[in-house]
Amino acid sequence: MFTKLKIFLEMIKFEHSVFALPFAFMGAILGSVVLNGHLPTWMQILWITLAMVGARTAAMSLNRVIDKAIDKKNPRTVNRAIPAGLISIKQVFIYIILSFALLFWATSNLSSLSMKLLPIAVFFLVIYSYTKRFTWACHFVLGLTLGLAPLGGWIAVTGQFTWSSIVFYLTVVCWSSGFDLIYACQDTEFDRKEGLYSLPSRFGIKAALMTARVLHALTAVGLITLFFMTHLSWFYLVGLVIAYFLLYKEHRLVSPNDLSKVNAAFFTMNGVLSLVVFVFTLLDVFVRQHS
């Protein structure tokens, strides 16, 4: 059982939760402080964590099932658990059902608006895996999906939308769409051969990397806009300086002629970036609350 669980966690790249989870926490913290004047409770953080784990696990599991035939043909993904025969479709579906149940249970313990919006979140979690079959804009659908993390965290503790939450949502949409574009460049030729849709396969790697740069420039604008909208202080700004450097470094690691460092640009830089922005936001809010 534990061996299968280990295989499953590797299959869904559980460690990649570091991308969205810090931003979900950040949304909860900023929303609670801005609108309620205090930090969210530990129970709220617990339910948000469980909801995020359920959502991401369900989405990634579905992605692996839906893409099993594609993964079996792609040299980069042929050794994934399902095409390699390390785990069965039936076993994965059990995890999917449990993950959606966890998402529903956790969300029911958060704000009423969270429950009302849950069907929309589930729609995006499911539809993303199909988009590469009919549109090169699939990267932006992923962005719209991952952007639900900070927006969901915000709504979970406040029960309402604000302009700050929308700006935060769009910022994470741009960030995640951008890094997915970089990651997709390594499958450009395979996608063309198999008739799959992606921006790199449609417009070329150079255009994809340029689009990613524009999206990450908009991410930088969004993060500094959030500074003015939520009255954060210089601790947050220190975090932004580091985040901007990481975005710059990410794009220095890849070029149309050299994609050998895609994994470092995709996972390392973006994983560190989300943690840095969250930690410095938390530090900023904590110092302000106790000053």
Image: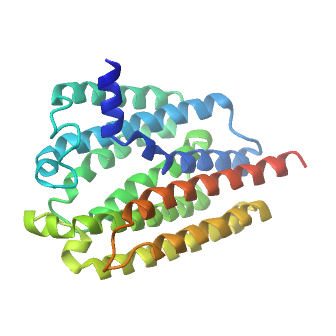
- Residue 242: image quadrant is bottom right
Q: Viewed as shown, does residue 181 lie left or right of 163? A: left
Q: Residue at x 31, y 80 (%)?
A: 257
Q: Viewed as shown, does residue 6 lie left or right of 195? A: right
Residue projecting furthest to the right: 291
Q: Residue at x 32, y 46 (%)?
A: 125
User: Residue 195, position in %: x, y?
Assistant: 9, 65
Q: How many marks?
A: 0
Residue 160 visible in the picture: no
Give the camera-side residue of 138 and 34.
Answer: 138
Q: Residue at x 29, y 24 (%)?
A: 4
User: Residue 78, position in %: x, y?
Assistant: 17, 48
User: Residue 205, position in %: x, y?
Assistant: 28, 77
Residue 80 visible in the picture: yes
Q: Is residue 166 above or below residue 20?
A: below
Q: Is residue 194 above or below residue 19?
A: below
Q: Which image quarter is the N terminus in?
A: top left
How is this picture coloured?
A: rainbow
Q: Is residue 135 above or below residue 27?
A: below
Give the camera-side residue of 39 and 279.
Answer: 279
Q: Residue at x 67, y 30 (%)?
A: 42
User: Residue 227, position in %: x, y?
Assistant: 69, 65
Q: Is residue 268 above or below residue 252?
A: above
Q: Viewed as shown, does residue 70 lie left or right of 159? A: left
Residue projecting furthest to the top: 1
